[in-house]
Amino acid sequence: MAGGLGSRFWPFSRNERPKQFLDFFGTGRSLLQMTFDRFRNVVPASNILIVSNIIYRNLILEQLPEIKSEQVLLEPTRRNTAPCIAYAVNRIKATTSTANIIVAPSDHLIMKEERFIETIQEGLDFVEKNNSLLTLGIKPSRPETGYGYIQVGEGTENPRKVKTFTEKPNAELAQVFFETGEFFWNSGIFLWNLKTIDSAFNIYLPEVAMKFNAGKDFYNTEKEQDFIDEMYPSCPNISIDYGIMEKAESVYVLCAEFGWSDLGTWGSLYDLSAKDDNQNVILKCETIMYDSNENIIALPKDKLAVIQDLNGYIVAESNNVLLICKRSDEQRIRQFVNDANFKFKGNYS
């Protein structure tokens, strides 16, 4: 899944090049490319589908020359993860009657890739043998308020039956979740077999299933895109979590630790990055810091930042926007983007 805007990473993440297409760590590979590299260890490149907004088609093919244009499924408008996944499921169903499927966002960071691949293989073995929906749960390392949580049932087996899904909690509730040991972070990575997920759409999101089933004669033909362009905007804007995972009866979580991060905010990037003696994170640019602590500075590589007496801030510049805001207030960045779009008619989005 590679169609998000990544607005919480503004001004680096912009409409024309969202965060999944950016190289945050100077490795020469974007988050999308790193995700593609990771899954090539599990499935052939020819079996990888990229679902994204139609405006990113050329960017995807430029960054992933190993895939063919027909492997890029193009959404004419954003409708959250359930329609996105339904599109891919129906494309796969038009090709084969049996398949084990992995669904993954394109903007996650995995630090322990070998352990991740082992976990994915374990999950594939489970869904091949069981008609259950499976998600990957991450053991929390802190009481995080920026992630959704999965509560597991009793027992020590793995995978474990899911008891409840919970949206992003407040700080007090996150502390309770962390201390009980019953809650895991919801990674947003799912595994299932084709039969199981197709059945789940028909049971829990029948209106979505009907819309995509209507195009069964068009998938993998030259008429596919015209069908999607006409039908897709009428799909409900709904997540796979809310639409299916929270309602289905046979849902399991494979609990694991493989150095996972949903690289969704400047704060998560700060936590993952190397720091100087004063706990400052400096990305790509040159800096001279005076009496400054716990900042993240991200400027173009040819820029020098001289900063004095600044503590706990985000300083980020990209193209025509400079952002300076408190790290503790980073949840307001979406508001900043909306305000800039309103005041300046989208010139800085």
Image (tube, grey):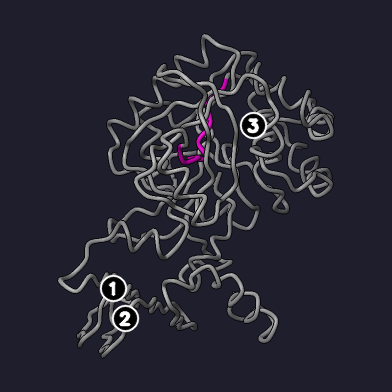
> Do residues under tags 1 and 2 come within 8 Å of each other at their CB atoms?
yes
Residue 337 sits above or below residue 145 on the image: below
In the image, what residue occupies the spot 46% across and 81% down?
323
Return the mark for residue 245: 3
- The Cα atoms of the two marked residues, 3 and 1, are separated by 38 Å
Residue 343 appears at what percent x and percent y? Answer: 68, 86
In the image, what residue occupies the spot 48% across and 50% down?
174
Quadrant of the rendering where the N terminus is positioned: top right
* Count of numbered marks: 3
Q: Is residue 278 left or right of residue 102?
A: left
Q: Is residue 251 left or right of residue 328?
A: right
Mark 2 or mark 3, earlier in chain: 3
Residue 31 appears at what percent x and percent y? Answer: 41, 51
User: Which stretch is magenta?
Assistant: 184-192
Check disc 1 and report its element: helix, strand or loop. Answer: loop
Residue type at numbered disc 3:
Met
Residue 43 sits above or below residue 6 on the image: above
Residue 179 sits above or below residue 205 on the image: below
In the image, what residue occupies the spot 65% across and 23% down?
197
Mark 3 or mark 1, earlier in chain: 3
Return the mark for residue 294: 1
Q: Which residue is mark 2?
A: 311
Mark 1 or mark 2, earlier in chain: 1
Q: Nearer the viewer, residue 277 or 225?
A: 277
Residue type at numbered disc 2:
Asn
Residue 99 appears at what percent x and percent y? Answer: 56, 17
Residue 211 appears at what percent x and percent y? Answer: 83, 34
Q: Is residue 227 left or right of residue 11?
A: right
Does the magenta portion include 143? Answer: no
Check disc 2 and report its element: helix, strand or loop. Answer: loop
- The Cα atoms of the two marked residues, 1 and 2, are separated by 6 Å
